[in-house]
């Protein structure tokens, strides 16, 4: 995953957290290859002592998608990667 793709991932996640609409983030995440999505999700780990805003936003994004009753299998796969 290139730095530009990681930036788009982080920016769309932050925008979703700010607006409460995670649709653009989930749509972007679904366009990534499985290995790129895996890498992006694993890169969410905060530095020691850092605040976990991105981690919380990611869980909120997945929860919102489940609440919309969309992409259940995809959300389950992403959550599996996140929890590893």
Image: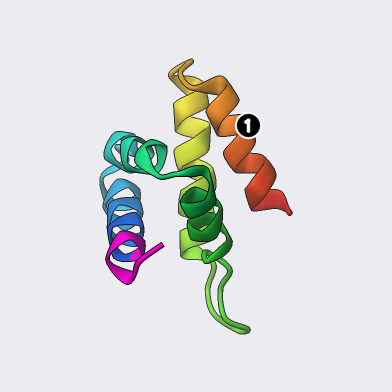
Is 3 or 19 nearer to us in this picture?
A: 3
Q: Residue 44's spot in the image, x, y percent?
A: 52, 64
Q: Is residue 43 left or right of residue 2?
A: right
Quick check: 78 above or below 84?
above
The magenta stretch is 1-6
- Total marks in image: 1
- Residue at image x 60%, y 84%? 49
The answer to which image quadrant residue 65 occupies is top left
Above-or-below relation of 66 to 21: above
Report x, y in % for residue 42.
58, 61
Residue located at (58% from left, 41% from top):
78
76 with respect to 23 (left or right) = right
SS class, disc 1? helix
- Reply yes or no: does residue 75 show up in magenta: no
Q: Which residue is mark 1?
A: 76
* Quarter of the image where the C terminus is located: bottom right
Helix, strand or loop for the magenta stretch, by majority: helix
Residue lying furthest right: 84
Which residue lies at the image location 54% right of the left edge and 80% below the top edge?
Answer: 50
Residue in view at x 47 percent, y 63 percent? 53
Please state which of residues 72 and 6 is positioned toward the viewer in this rendering. Answer: 6
Let me know if residue 5 is in the magenta part: yes
Residue furthest top as drawn: 69
Question: In the picture, which quadrant includes the N terminus?
Answer: bottom left
């Amino acid at each position: 995953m290139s730095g530009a793709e990681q930036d788009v991932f982080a920016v769309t996640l932050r925008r979703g957290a700010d607006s409460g609409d995670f649709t653009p983030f989930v749509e972007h995440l679904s366009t990534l290859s499985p290995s790129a999505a895996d890498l992006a999700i694993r890169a969410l780990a905060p530095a020691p002592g850092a605040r976990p805003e991105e981690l919380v936003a990611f869980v909120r994004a997945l929860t919102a998608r489940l609440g919309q009753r969309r992409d259940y299998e995809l959300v389950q796969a992403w959550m599996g990667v996140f929890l590893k």
